Image (cartoon, rainbow, N blue to C red):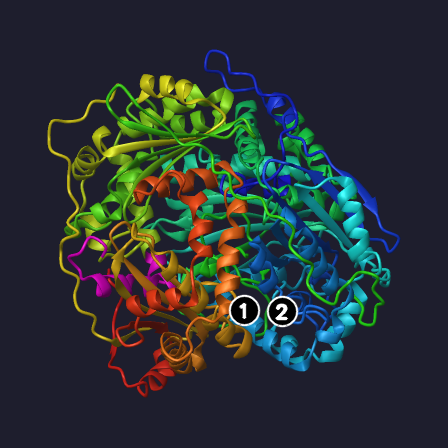
Amino acid sequence: MPRFHRFALALAVTTSLVAAGPALAKAKGGDPAPISELVKAVDIPYQSFTLDNGLRVIVHEDRKAPVVAVSVWYRVGSKHEPKGKTGFAHLFEHLMFNGSENAPGDFFEPLQQVGATDSNGTTNVDRTNYFETVPTGALDRALFLESDRMGHLLGAVTQEKLDNQRGVVQNEKRQGDNNPYGLLRYEIFENLFPTGHPYHHSTIGSMGDLNSASLTDVKKWFTDNYGPNNAVLVLAGDVDIATAKAKVQEWFGDIPRGPEVTAPATSVPTLPAPLAKEVKDLIPTTRIYRMWAIPGLNDPEAVPLQMAMSVLGGLSSSRLDNALVRKEPVAVSVSAFAQPFEDAGILLVQADVKPGVEPAVVAKRLDEEIASFLASGPTADELQRTAASYLAGTISGLESVGGFGGKAVTLAEGALYSNNPAYYKVELDRMAKATPEQVKAVAEKWLSRPAFSLTYTPGERTEGGENRGGAVKDGKVAAAIQPDRYWNPDLGDTGPAMSGTTSFADRSKLPAVADLTALDFPAIERAKLKNGVEVIFARRTTVPTVNVAVSFDAGYAADPHSALGTQSLMLSLMDEGTQNLDSIAFAEAKERLGAQIDASANADETVFSLFALKPNLGASLGLLADYIRNPAFDGKELERVRAQQLNRLKAELNNPNALASRVLLPVLYGADHPYGIPPTGLGNEAAVKAVTRDELAAFHATWIRPDNARIFVVGDTTLAEVKKQLDATLGQWKAPATAKPVKHFEIAIPKPQPRILLVDRPKSPQSVILAGRVLDAKGGDDLEALRTANDIFGGNFLSRFNMNLRETKGWSYGVRTRISSDKDRITWVAAAPVQADRTGDSIKELQSELKTFLGAKGVTPEEREWSTNGSIRELPGSFETSGDVLGGVRNIVKFGRPDKYYESLPATYEAMTPAAIDAAARKALSADGLVYVVVGDAAVVKPQLDGLGLPVETVSPAN
């Protein structure tokens, strides 16, 4: 699980932990399972040992999949950086991926060869971590690589590598700064923590400090901080303690201890008086913040404080949601959360002003609601819903061994921050025992202090982030500060000690890969409900949870082109209650059951999803059926969600990545094609303002009908049992007499007209480049060879395009090419966020690389090997969780593939030759027929584009 301080993320991301406790009993009479029973079910058994050099090793055995998560955590973060060296911890994290003395190439290449998943590194204020999940037979290779960069790095650190990664980090900083709210992190740290406090600056650092980093500086940083005695190694998965001891001693035992690292002195500061500040940014509406510094995660008051914030603004049924968004709609969204770090933390309460409402009114109401909450405290029911929601999120992740939030993370954090790998149990115990009186007292204690009031108002920025350190993204806020990562998260990336050490391990070559276990995909079973709806089922019993997806053949392609945004508005309105439960009652019912029920769409499908705890499955399915079949479509709620969608639309028009996509797809497909629309489905302002309640109900009646549905179920139940429960809820649903609707994919796609479409975004430090074309292929075709070609050219971290622009040139934090996964005609798109002064050069490089790849320098045997090996060997780790399996089953059905499709893939890849990969690429791709979209500062960018030999048109995004 995530430690409790990541509470607000619990339902948004997969978490960790292994349930080794008792099975959960079925709820009686529809009552939710007791919190105490859920807490008992959460357990991560572990054993530990320490090498003579001080390396602490924690081992958790989990044999459900043939993979091992390897996670190395160093106690060094930005709080350890002295003045003038901000950003050093994160810069060195990057250098650690650029090769070591005995593995001089890119760190990811040997991991790609073995099919590693979840490979990345992150840095935050307190620590730096590196992690990868590898097939069991590749554990020696992972340990060799991690130990080589711990003990044999400095001989491989060169001035050229430092200069390159400095450029990459600076482009990471530009990319973060370029986003709406990109400068927020500066405001948080610099105002809540005084000058001289270790948390006063943030992780990414300032441009000046990064530029001044010398080779001597960074080498000393390594010798001072990266010794084994300043690290924790966690192995979680298909490994036992005896194996771990032998392997860790072999690979890490020779590394000498480093200097003892002294933690900087810290405190939890209180502002001497209330502080207020206003800043401008390219945002859709005014946002009002109230912020405080709070105690760190080991403080006994950290958990009750987080529970208080969940009640105030974290739950869907929170006090702020009910008061300011639902009952008196003066805000379009609200949030409250506490995010403790090791030594201190931050608490944020925020409200986005509803357009047309005076910000001063919202600020006054926000302060009144905070005061009201402090006066009354939470109710016992609110605390139960908080705990149930958190525990459901915890148990939903019981299957993950590694990655960003797996059980390896839980054990490492406990060991590093609290000297107790099982510290999560302390937090769960505090959560289960929290009382309304205790939570009220803690909230009153910390929120009665002077606040930092920050107001973000729409407008052009008056300052940049060059000399400040940090970057943050907008969204439904669950944590203000995310770690800085080695791989670029905007591209969907999750990842795949002292020089001169004498080694007794053989480091002359990479360790051989032992026998690897093939993927054993769960058997797919099928049945039909009484009304003919097909149920597709796969059983997974690792944890007591069930995932359900009711999928309709609709998606954004079903949106009427005269009223784009209709479906998104319909789905948002469906979240606001049914004919039997109003908005608040529906939210509370989900929270009590620990159920997550929501709707989403992609280009082809509209999906209503349920995550349920096994003992609460029956009641949760009843809620899901009511949600799908009986939406209230309340007219008052419509005006509220309409305002929210218009606000999201405004935000999209200020986001450079979203802007580029809004322009590109309608141009590629043509405005009349079902896919020729902005891809997020938010539509355009005029249509969203005009659509009526009756039109939303009509869209629901037309597309959301049982004869247009399939139901997918993966989890700890049986097909017979879940069919019985579904028959009682969705099996009674009768299809209307009218004919099923049709999407018109026969509409002709226009011939591509190569050109550059420029969207002016003044003062952008970075340009976003998209280049694309529609392919003569559909998503269900045999595309493995083409996708492998794309992997080699631009789809992988190790690809030619990324290694050129990021690792060689240092012009970008990361670039990618991707092939879409739509059911009908698919696209190939290159995405390149680059520093503004290299926009034209980056397009030249894309063109040159692509022409060369499709011509004289096709796929090499080495590229074919790393790509196909990775694709084969990553399969077992790719279906570790029930959610992974659910996605795989849905893809099999969507594209009409055989049930054994994923198990047959290794043979397909093994038979693939470089010539076959080249042939697929040359048939589908071309450097000549591309349409480019560039979002950037036209004053800087247009002179660069004018010399490229393509027409340049300045355009506005489709709205």
Task: Report the disc number at residue 97.
Answer: none
At 78% across and 51% down in the image, what residue appears? 248
The magenta span reads 650-675
Amino acid identity at mark 2: Gly
Q: Residues within 10 Å of mark 2 (few under 14, many from 20)?
A: many
> Which circle's residue, 1 or 2, is located before the other in the chain?
1
Asked whether the viewer can see residue 807, the reply is yes
- Side (left or right) of 258 relative to 916: right
- Side (left or right) of 176 relative to 723: right
Q: Quadrant of the C terminus?
A: bottom left
Residue extending furthest toward the right: 52
Q: Position of residue 130 (x, y in %)?
A: 66, 57
Q: Position of residue 162 (x, y in %)?
A: 65, 77
Q: Which residue is mark 1?
A: 173
Asked whether the viewer can see residue 340, the reply is no
Residue 247 falls within the magenta-colored stretch: no
Residue extending furthest toward the left: 738
Task: Report the disc number at residue 205.
Answer: 2
Residue 670 falls within the magenta-colored stretch: yes
Q: Residues within 10 Å of mark 1 (few under 14, many from 20)?
A: many
Amino acid identity at mark 1: Lys
